[in-house]
Protein backbone atom coordinates (compact mmCIF):
# COMPACT_ATOMS: atom_id res chain seq x y z
CA UNK A 1 0.00 0.00 0.00
CA UNK A 2 1.21 3.49 -0.90
CA UNK A 3 0.45 6.40 1.44
CA UNK A 4 -0.08 9.65 -0.46
CA UNK A 5 -0.36 12.98 1.37
CA UNK A 6 -2.32 15.16 -1.04
CA UNK A 7 -2.58 18.90 -1.51
CA UNK A 8 -5.47 20.86 -2.96
CA UNK A 9 -5.61 24.42 -4.29
CA UNK A 10 -6.45 25.42 -0.71
CA UNK A 11 -2.68 25.22 -0.10
CA UNK A 12 -2.59 28.89 -1.16
CA UNK A 13 -4.07 29.89 2.21
CA UNK A 14 -0.76 28.79 3.79
CA UNK A 15 1.31 31.29 1.77
CA UNK A 16 4.21 32.11 1.94
CA UNK A 17 5.37 28.75 3.31
CA UNK A 18 3.74 26.56 0.66
CA UNK A 19 5.37 28.52 -2.18
CA UNK A 20 8.45 26.25 -2.17
CA UNK A 21 7.14 23.09 -0.47
CA UNK A 22 4.14 20.77 -0.19
CA UNK A 23 1.81 21.19 2.78
CA UNK A 24 3.10 17.87 4.17
CA UNK A 25 6.52 19.45 4.80
CA UNK A 26 5.27 22.32 6.96
CA UNK A 27 6.33 21.89 10.57
CA UNK A 28 4.40 22.59 13.73
CA UNK A 29 5.81 21.13 16.92
CA UNK A 30 8.90 18.99 16.33
CA UNK A 31 7.73 17.21 13.19
CA UNK A 32 6.27 17.93 9.80
CA UNK A 33 3.12 16.07 8.89
CA UNK A 34 5.11 13.89 6.49
CA UNK A 35 7.40 12.86 9.38
CA UNK A 36 4.46 12.43 11.74
CA UNK A 37 2.53 10.10 9.44
CA UNK A 38 5.71 8.14 8.70
CA UNK A 39 6.19 7.42 12.41
CA UNK A 40 2.54 6.50 12.89
CA UNK A 41 2.15 4.33 9.79
CA UNK A 42 5.68 2.89 9.77
CA UNK A 43 6.21 3.72 6.08
CA UNK A 44 7.43 6.67 4.02
CA UNK A 45 4.55 8.68 2.54
CA UNK A 46 4.59 10.19 -0.93
CA UNK A 47 3.23 13.67 -1.58
CA UNK A 48 0.85 14.79 -4.34
CA UNK A 49 1.16 18.52 -4.90
CA UNK A 50 1.35 21.18 -7.62
CA UNK A 51 3.19 20.29 -10.81
CA UNK A 52 6.00 22.87 -10.43
CA UNK A 53 7.13 21.01 -7.28
CA UNK A 54 7.22 17.56 -8.89
CA UNK A 55 10.95 17.56 -9.73
CA UNK A 56 11.75 17.76 -6.03
CA UNK A 57 8.69 15.83 -4.87
CA UNK A 58 7.95 13.19 -7.54
CA UNK A 59 4.61 11.47 -7.76
CA UNK A 60 4.38 7.81 -6.72
CA UNK A 61 4.83 5.39 -9.61
CA UNK A 62 1.57 3.69 -8.68
CA UNK A 63 -1.16 6.29 -8.08
CA UNK A 64 -3.39 3.92 -6.16
CA UNK A 65 -3.22 3.81 -2.39
CA UNK A 66 -4.30 5.56 0.78
CA UNK A 67 -4.75 9.29 0.11
CA UNK A 68 -4.62 11.50 3.23
CA UNK A 69 -5.19 15.26 3.29
CA UNK A 70 -1.73 16.74 3.93
CA UNK A 71 -3.30 19.44 6.13
CA UNK A 72 -4.67 16.85 8.58
CA UNK A 73 -2.95 16.75 11.97
CA UNK A 74 -3.20 13.10 13.08
CA UNK A 75 -4.87 12.60 16.44
CA UNK A 76 -4.81 9.02 17.80
CA UNK A 77 -8.52 8.69 16.96
CA UNK A 78 -8.39 9.83 13.33
CA UNK A 79 -5.07 8.07 12.68
CA UNK A 80 -6.55 4.82 13.97
CA UNK A 81 -9.65 5.23 11.80
CA UNK A 82 -7.58 5.98 8.69
CA UNK A 83 -5.39 2.92 9.26
CA UNK A 84 -8.54 0.79 9.14
CA UNK A 85 -9.80 2.12 5.78
CA UNK A 86 -10.09 -0.63 3.19
CA UNK A 87 -9.80 -0.22 -0.61
CA UNK A 88 -12.74 1.65 -2.11
CA UNK A 89 -13.63 3.49 1.11
CA UNK A 90 -12.91 6.89 2.60
CA UNK A 91 -13.74 9.62 5.11
CA UNK A 92 -15.04 13.16 4.71
CA UNK A 93 -15.44 16.04 7.12
CA UNK A 94 -17.90 18.82 6.29
CA UNK A 95 -17.90 17.72 2.67
CA UNK A 96 -14.09 17.65 2.31
CA UNK A 97 -12.33 14.36 1.62
CA UNK A 98 -9.80 13.81 4.40
CA UNK A 99 -8.82 10.24 3.51
CA UNK A 100 -9.63 7.79 0.71
CA UNK A 101 -8.25 4.40 -0.32
CA UNK A 102 -8.26 4.64 -4.12
CA UNK A 103 -7.63 1.71 -6.45
CA UNK A 104 -6.59 4.06 -9.28
CA UNK A 105 -4.89 7.45 -9.55
CA UNK A 106 -6.96 10.42 -8.38
CA UNK A 107 -6.59 13.82 -10.10
CA UNK A 108 -4.90 16.79 -8.45
CA UNK A 109 -7.34 18.86 -6.38
CA UNK A 110 -9.88 16.05 -6.42
CA UNK A 111 -13.18 16.41 -4.58
CA UNK A 112 -15.80 13.95 -3.40
CA UNK A 113 -17.30 14.21 -6.88
CA UNK A 114 -14.15 12.63 -8.34
CA UNK A 115 -14.48 9.65 -5.98
CA UNK A 116 -17.43 7.93 -7.68
CA UNK A 117 -16.00 4.46 -7.07
CA UNK A 118 -15.19 5.21 -3.42
CA UNK A 119 -17.70 4.85 -0.60
CA UNK A 120 -17.31 7.98 1.55
CA UNK A 121 -18.69 8.39 5.06
CA UNK A 122 -18.64 11.46 7.30
CA UNK A 123 -16.14 11.34 10.17
CA UNK A 124 -18.11 12.17 13.35
CA UNK A 125 -15.15 13.36 15.44
CA UNK A 126 -13.12 16.53 15.45
CA UNK A 127 -10.28 17.14 13.00
CA UNK A 128 -7.44 19.67 12.82
CA UNK A 129 -6.69 20.92 9.32
CA UNK A 130 -3.87 23.40 8.76
CA UNK A 131 -5.37 26.33 6.90
CA UNK A 132 -3.31 29.43 7.78
CA UNK A 133 0.40 30.04 8.40
CA UNK A 134 -0.05 31.50 11.89
CA UNK A 135 -1.55 28.18 13.05
CA UNK A 136 1.98 26.74 12.83
CA UNK A 137 2.78 28.72 16.01
CA UNK A 138 -0.69 28.80 17.53
CA UNK A 139 -0.58 25.00 17.62
CA UNK A 140 3.15 24.71 18.38
CA UNK A 141 2.68 24.23 22.12
CA UNK A 142 0.27 21.30 21.82
CA UNK A 143 2.22 19.72 18.96
CA UNK A 144 5.57 19.99 20.77
CA UNK A 145 4.06 18.03 23.65
CA UNK A 146 2.50 15.30 21.52
CA UNK A 147 5.54 15.00 19.22
CA UNK A 148 7.82 14.74 22.26
CA UNK A 149 5.81 11.75 23.49
CA UNK A 150 5.83 10.17 20.02
CA UNK A 151 9.58 10.60 19.47
CA UNK A 152 10.83 9.64 22.93
CA UNK A 153 8.50 6.72 23.71
CA UNK A 154 10.45 3.72 25.06
CA UNK A 155 13.78 5.53 24.60
CA UNK A 156 16.41 6.73 27.07
CA UNK A 157 17.87 10.23 26.96
CA UNK A 158 21.58 10.94 26.97
CA UNK A 159 22.66 12.04 30.47
CA UNK A 160 22.31 15.69 31.44
CA UNK A 161 25.61 17.26 32.41
CA UNK A 162 25.85 18.30 36.06
CA UNK A 163 27.03 21.74 34.93
CA UNK A 164 23.45 22.63 33.93
CA UNK A 165 20.70 24.00 36.15
CA UNK A 166 17.54 22.02 35.43
CA UNK A 167 13.93 21.93 36.60
CA UNK A 168 11.87 18.80 35.86
CA UNK A 169 14.79 16.98 34.21
CA UNK A 170 12.55 13.96 33.61
CA UNK A 171 10.92 16.01 30.82
CA UNK A 172 14.25 16.80 29.11
CA UNK A 173 15.41 14.49 26.31
CA UNK A 174 18.90 14.83 24.81
CA UNK A 175 19.91 13.02 21.63
CA UNK A 176 23.36 11.61 20.88
CA UNK A 177 26.09 14.13 20.11
CA UNK A 178 24.30 17.15 21.60
CA UNK A 179 26.47 19.49 23.70
CA UNK A 180 24.72 21.21 26.61
CA UNK A 181 26.85 22.80 29.34
CA UNK A 182 26.22 25.55 31.92
CA UNK A 183 22.67 26.24 30.73
CA UNK A 184 19.41 26.83 32.59
CA UNK A 185 16.68 24.47 31.38
CA UNK A 186 13.21 24.54 32.92
CA UNK A 187 10.93 21.78 31.66
CA UNK A 188 8.26 22.20 34.32
CA UNK A 189 5.93 24.08 31.94
CA UNK A 190 6.58 21.77 28.97
CA UNK A 191 9.07 19.23 27.60
CA UNK A 192 12.47 20.10 26.17
CA UNK A 193 13.84 18.12 23.22
CA UNK A 194 17.51 18.59 22.27
CA UNK A 195 18.32 17.07 18.90
CA UNK A 196 21.31 15.16 17.62
CA UNK A 197 24.60 17.10 17.40
CA UNK A 198 22.97 20.36 18.48
CA UNK A 199 24.76 22.91 20.67
CA UNK A 200 23.39 24.97 23.55
CA UNK A 201 26.16 27.41 24.44
CA UNK A 202 26.81 28.29 28.04
CA UNK A 203 24.49 30.80 29.65
CA UNK A 204 21.47 29.94 27.48
CA UNK A 205 18.11 30.14 29.28
CA UNK A 206 15.52 27.66 28.00
CA UNK A 207 11.94 27.24 29.19
CA UNK A 208 9.76 24.53 27.65
CA UNK A 209 8.04 23.48 25.63
CA UNK A 210 11.07 23.77 23.39
CA UNK A 211 12.80 21.77 20.68
CA UNK A 212 16.11 22.23 18.93
CA UNK A 213 16.69 19.93 15.96
CA UNK A 214 19.81 18.35 14.50
CA UNK A 215 23.02 20.42 14.37
CA UNK A 216 21.31 23.67 15.38
CA UNK A 217 22.92 26.20 17.75
CA UNK A 218 21.60 28.37 20.59
CA UNK A 219 24.10 31.12 21.38
CA UNK A 220 25.32 32.38 24.75
CA UNK A 221 22.83 34.27 26.88
CA UNK A 222 19.84 33.48 24.69
CA UNK A 223 16.41 33.67 26.36
CA UNK A 224 14.00 31.24 24.74
CA UNK A 225 10.61 30.23 26.04
CA UNK A 226 7.71 28.16 24.87
CA UNK A 227 6.57 27.18 22.58
CA UNK A 228 9.60 27.43 20.29
CA UNK A 229 11.12 25.08 17.72
CA UNK A 230 14.59 25.69 16.26
CA UNK A 231 15.05 23.83 12.97
CA UNK A 232 17.99 21.86 11.66
CA UNK A 233 21.27 23.83 11.36
CA UNK A 234 19.66 27.06 12.55
CA UNK A 235 21.60 29.50 14.73
CA UNK A 236 19.56 31.55 17.22
CA UNK A 237 20.17 34.06 19.99
CA UNK A 238 18.54 37.00 21.78
CA UNK A 239 14.95 36.73 23.03
CA UNK A 240 12.58 34.29 21.33
CA UNK A 241 9.04 33.33 22.27
CA UNK A 242 6.55 30.93 20.64
CA UNK A 243 8.31 30.81 17.27
CA UNK A 244 8.77 28.12 14.61
CA UNK A 245 12.08 28.24 12.76
CA UNK A 246 12.27 26.10 9.64
CA UNK A 247 15.70 24.65 8.79
CA UNK A 248 18.93 26.57 7.99
CA UNK A 249 17.82 30.00 9.21
CA UNK A 250 19.60 32.45 11.53
CA UNK A 251 18.56 34.89 14.21
CA UNK A 252 21.96 34.86 15.81
CA UNK A 253 21.96 38.15 17.76
CA UNK A 254 19.97 40.27 20.20
CA UNK A 255 16.46 41.41 19.38
CA UNK A 256 12.99 39.99 20.00
CA UNK A 257 10.98 37.55 17.88
CA UNK A 258 7.62 36.24 19.09
CA UNK A 259 4.58 34.38 17.70
CA UNK A 260 6.40 34.10 14.39
CA UNK A 261 7.16 31.62 11.62
CA UNK A 262 10.58 31.85 9.97
CA UNK A 263 11.04 30.00 6.66
CA UNK A 264 14.17 28.21 5.47
CA UNK A 265 17.39 30.07 4.61
CA UNK A 266 16.35 33.31 6.29
CA UNK A 267 18.76 35.63 8.08
CA UNK A 268 17.57 38.16 10.65
CA UNK A 269 20.06 40.97 11.28
CA UNK A 270 21.40 42.02 14.69
CA UNK A 271 19.08 44.17 16.79
CA UNK A 272 15.95 43.32 14.79
CA UNK A 273 12.68 42.93 16.67
CA UNK A 274 9.15 42.15 15.60
CA UNK A 275 5.88 43.30 17.11
CA UNK A 276 3.42 40.54 17.97
CA UNK A 277 0.57 42.59 19.49
CA UNK A 278 -1.11 45.85 18.55
CA UNK A 279 -1.04 48.83 20.92
CA UNK A 280 -4.82 48.48 21.00
CA UNK A 281 -4.58 44.74 21.76
CA UNK A 282 -7.02 44.37 18.87
CA UNK A 283 -7.34 41.81 16.10
CA UNK A 284 -4.35 41.36 13.80
CA UNK A 285 -4.77 40.67 10.09
CA UNK A 286 -2.14 39.30 7.74
CA UNK A 287 -2.03 39.71 3.95
CA UNK A 288 -2.40 36.64 1.74
CA UNK A 289 -1.05 37.55 -1.70
CA UNK A 290 -2.37 34.57 -3.72
CA UNK A 291 -5.89 35.19 -2.37
CA UNK A 292 -5.54 39.00 -2.41
CA UNK A 293 -7.19 39.31 0.97
CA UNK A 294 -6.55 40.02 4.65
CA UNK A 295 -6.93 37.09 7.05
CA UNK A 296 -7.70 37.50 10.75
CA UNK A 297 -4.92 35.97 12.87
CA UNK A 298 -6.09 36.65 16.45
CA UNK A 299 -4.62 39.12 18.91
CA UNK A 300 -1.05 37.70 18.93
CA UNK A 301 0.83 37.36 15.66
CA UNK A 302 4.41 38.25 14.82
CA UNK A 303 6.06 38.03 11.42
CA UNK A 304 5.55 35.37 8.74
CA UNK A 305 8.96 35.41 7.05
CA UNK A 306 9.02 33.67 3.66
CA UNK A 307 11.88 31.38 2.66
CA UNK A 308 15.21 32.84 1.45
CA UNK A 309 14.36 36.23 3.00
CA UNK A 310 16.96 38.47 4.69
CA UNK A 311 16.24 41.22 7.24
CA UNK A 312 18.62 44.15 7.70
CA UNK A 313 20.14 45.01 11.09
CA UNK A 314 18.11 46.99 13.63
CA UNK A 315 14.86 46.48 11.72
CA UNK A 316 11.49 47.10 13.34
CA UNK A 317 8.94 44.68 11.93
CA UNK A 318 5.30 45.54 12.26
CA UNK A 319 2.63 43.33 13.79
CA UNK A 320 1.66 40.46 11.50
CA UNK A 321 4.16 41.35 8.77
CA UNK A 322 4.34 38.92 5.84
CA UNK A 323 7.31 38.72 3.50
CA UNK A 324 7.27 36.74 0.30
CA UNK A 325 9.94 34.45 -1.09
CA UNK A 326 13.51 35.72 -1.56
CA UNK A 327 12.84 39.22 -0.23
CA UNK A 328 15.25 41.75 1.23
CA UNK A 329 13.62 43.51 4.19
CA UNK A 330 14.96 47.06 4.66
CA UNK A 331 13.09 49.29 7.09
CA UNK A 332 12.76 52.99 7.75
CA UNK A 333 10.77 53.01 10.95
CA UNK A 334 8.20 50.21 11.08
CA UNK A 335 8.21 47.81 8.14
CA UNK A 336 5.39 47.50 5.63
CA UNK A 337 2.70 44.91 6.39
CA UNK A 338 3.53 42.98 3.21
CA UNK A 339 6.74 42.67 1.20
CA UNK A 340 6.36 40.90 -2.14
CA UNK A 341 8.35 37.99 -3.56
CA UNK A 342 11.78 39.01 -4.92
CA UNK A 343 11.75 42.50 -3.43
CA UNK A 344 15.21 44.07 -3.17
CA UNK A 345 14.20 47.48 -1.79
CA UNK A 346 10.58 48.24 -1.01
CA UNK A 347 11.33 51.97 -0.69
CA UNK A 348 12.74 52.33 -4.21
CA UNK A 349 10.69 49.61 -5.87
CA UNK A 350 13.80 47.68 -6.90
CA UNK A 351 13.30 43.97 -7.56
CA UNK A 352 15.72 41.18 -6.70
CA UNK A 353 17.06 40.09 -10.10
CA UNK A 354 16.80 36.31 -10.39
CA UNK A 355 20.45 35.67 -11.25
CA UNK A 356 21.57 37.71 -8.22
CA UNK A 357 19.10 35.91 -5.98
CA UNK A 358 20.48 32.54 -7.11
CA UNK A 359 24.09 33.70 -6.62
CA UNK A 360 23.36 34.97 -3.11
CA UNK A 361 21.39 31.85 -2.17
CA UNK A 362 24.30 29.66 -3.27
CA UNK A 363 26.63 31.75 -1.10
CA UNK A 364 24.41 31.32 1.97
CA UNK A 365 24.11 27.58 1.39
CA UNK A 366 27.89 27.20 1.17
CA UNK A 367 28.14 28.67 4.69
CA UNK A 368 26.19 25.65 5.97
CA UNK A 369 27.81 23.13 3.61
CA UNK A 370 24.62 22.70 1.59
CA UNK A 371 24.03 22.78 -2.16
CA UNK A 372 21.43 24.71 -4.14
CA UNK A 373 19.98 21.93 -6.29
CA UNK A 374 18.65 22.17 -9.80
CA UNK A 375 15.19 21.31 -8.46
CA UNK A 376 15.36 24.13 -5.88
CA UNK A 377 16.44 26.59 -8.55
CA UNK A 378 13.58 25.52 -10.84
CA UNK A 379 11.05 26.15 -8.05
CA UNK A 380 12.44 29.65 -7.48
CA UNK A 381 12.42 30.30 -11.22
CA UNK A 382 8.72 29.35 -11.35
CA UNK A 383 7.88 31.74 -8.50
CA UNK A 384 9.93 34.51 -10.10
CA UNK A 385 8.28 34.02 -13.50
CA UNK A 386 4.80 34.06 -11.99
CA UNK A 387 5.15 36.90 -9.49
CA UNK A 388 2.59 39.74 -9.88
Image (spheres, rainbow, N blue to C red):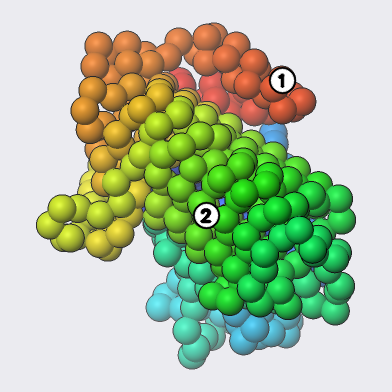
Q: Residue at x 52, y 15 (%)?
A: 357
Instruction: Place residue 78 in its image quadrant.
Output: bottom right
Left or right: residue 96 compared with residue 250: left
Q: Would residue 118 appear left or right of 347 to someone viewing this image?
A: right
Q: Position of residue 300 (x, y in %)?
A: 30, 59
Q: Is residue 92 above or below residue 54?
A: below
Label 1, secondary structure: give it.
Answer: helix
Please say if 77 is above or below 114.
below
Residue 206 in view in this figure: yes
Image quarter where the N terminus lies is bottom right
* Residue 73 placement (x, y as % from top left): 56, 70
| Disc 2 crowd, CA 10 A, few/some/many (<14, 14-19, 20+) | many
Pick whichever of labels 2 and 1 is earlier in the sequence: 2
Q: Are marks 2 and 1 in contact (CB under 8 Å)?
A: no
Eyeballing the image, is 202 above or below 103?
above
Residue found 77% across the figure and 25% down from its top: 369
Q: Which mark is residue 224?
A: 2
Q: How far apart, in angstroms, are the residues tagged by discs 2 and 1?
A: 28 Å
Front residue of 358/52: it is 358
As drawn, the residue found furthest toward the left would be: 280
Which residue matches tag 1?
366
Q: Quadrant of residue 216?
A: top right
Tell me if mark 1 has few (under 14), some (14-19) or many (20+) residues whose alpha carbon lies within 10 angstroms of its own: few
* Rendered residue at 29%/34% (across/down): 316
Instruction: From this view, report whether residue 135 is shown above or below residue 353.
Output: below
- Residue 125 numbered mark, or none: none
**Residue lying at the far front of the rendered structure:** 163
The x and y percentages for residue 41 are: 78, 72
Label 2: state its secondary structure: strand
Amino acid sequence: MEVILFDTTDRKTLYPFTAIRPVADLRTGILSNRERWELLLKMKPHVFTESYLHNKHPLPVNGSGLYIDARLIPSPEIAGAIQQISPGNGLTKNGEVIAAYATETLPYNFTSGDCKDISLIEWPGEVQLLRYPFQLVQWNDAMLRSDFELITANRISQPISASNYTVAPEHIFIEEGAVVENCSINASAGPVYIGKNSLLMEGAFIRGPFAILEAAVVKMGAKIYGATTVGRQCTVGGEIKNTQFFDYSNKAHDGYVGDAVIGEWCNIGAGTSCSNIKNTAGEIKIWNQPLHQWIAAGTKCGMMLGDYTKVSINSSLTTGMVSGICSNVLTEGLSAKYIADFTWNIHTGEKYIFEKAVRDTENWMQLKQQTFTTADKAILQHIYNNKP
